[in-house]
């Protein structure tokens, strides 16, 4: 998947433990662990906003787009069709 979640990096920078963050944003530690590992298919904006509020960061600090061959091909094809 071309979206990589960098939540663990920001938590380390802010010295915030998983149990503290989970409690502060209102999700279980198990769900936070899934989110940190990237094993989720979606993320609510309200959850993302709560994480950013607690960690004092921006969404771009937590999410990174790393294109793979498939996404690059799809992007080029979409531009050709639109143009």
Image (tube, helix red, strand yellow):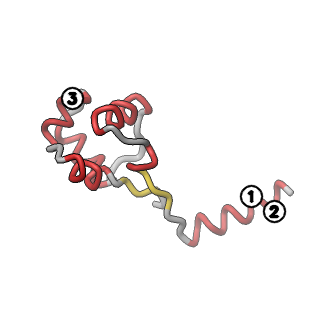
The answer to whether 48 is drawn above or below residue 77 in the figure is above
Residue drawn where x is 54% and y is 66% of the image: 67
Quarter-wise, where is residue 27 in the image? top left
- Which SS class for mark 1? helix
Q: Cα distance, mark 3 to mark 2?
A: 45 Å
Q: How many marks on residues?
A: 3
Quarter placement of the C terminus: bottom right
Mark 2 lies on residue: 80
Residue 74: give x, y in percent of width and height. 66, 63
| Image-based side of 80 in relation to 49, left or right | right
Determine contact: label 1, label 3, CB under 8 Å: no
| Camera-nearest residue between 31 and 15 | 15
Callout 2 crowding tier (Cα within 10 Å): few <14, some 14–19, many ≥20: few
The answer to whether 69 is drawn above or below residue 34 in the figure is below
Going from the N terminus, do you reach mark 3 or mark 2 first?
3
Mark 3 lies on residue: 24
| Camera-nearest residue between 38 and 19 | 19
| Image-based side of 41 in relation to 51, left or right | right
Going from the N terminus, do you reach mark 1 or mark 3 first?
3
| Camera-nearest residue between 40 and 64 | 64
> Which one is closest to the eye, mark 3 or mark 2?
3
Residue drawn where x is 30% and y is 46% of the image: 35
Residue drawn where x is 26% and y is 29% of the image: 25
Q: Cα distance, mark 1 to mark 3?
A: 41 Å
Quarter-wise, where is residue 19 in the image? top left
Callout 3 crowding tier (Cα within 10 Å): few <14, some 14–19, many ≥20: few
Mark 1 lies on residue: 78
- Which SS class for mark 2? helix
> Which one is closest to the eye, mark 1 or mark 3?
3
Residue 13: give x, y in percent of width and height. 24, 52
Determine contact: label 1, label 2, CB under 8 Å: yes
């Amino acid at each position: 998947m071309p979206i990589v979640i960098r939540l663990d990096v920001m938590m380390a920078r802010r010295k915030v433990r998983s149990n503290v963050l989970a409690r502060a944003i209102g999700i279980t530690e198990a769900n936070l662990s899934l989110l940190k590992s990237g094993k989720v298919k979606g993320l609510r904006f309200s959850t993302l906003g709560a994480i950013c509020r607690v960690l004092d960061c921006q969404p771009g600090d937590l999410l990174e787009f790393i294109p793979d061959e498939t996404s690059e091909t799809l992007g080029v094809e979409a531009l050709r069709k639109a143009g």
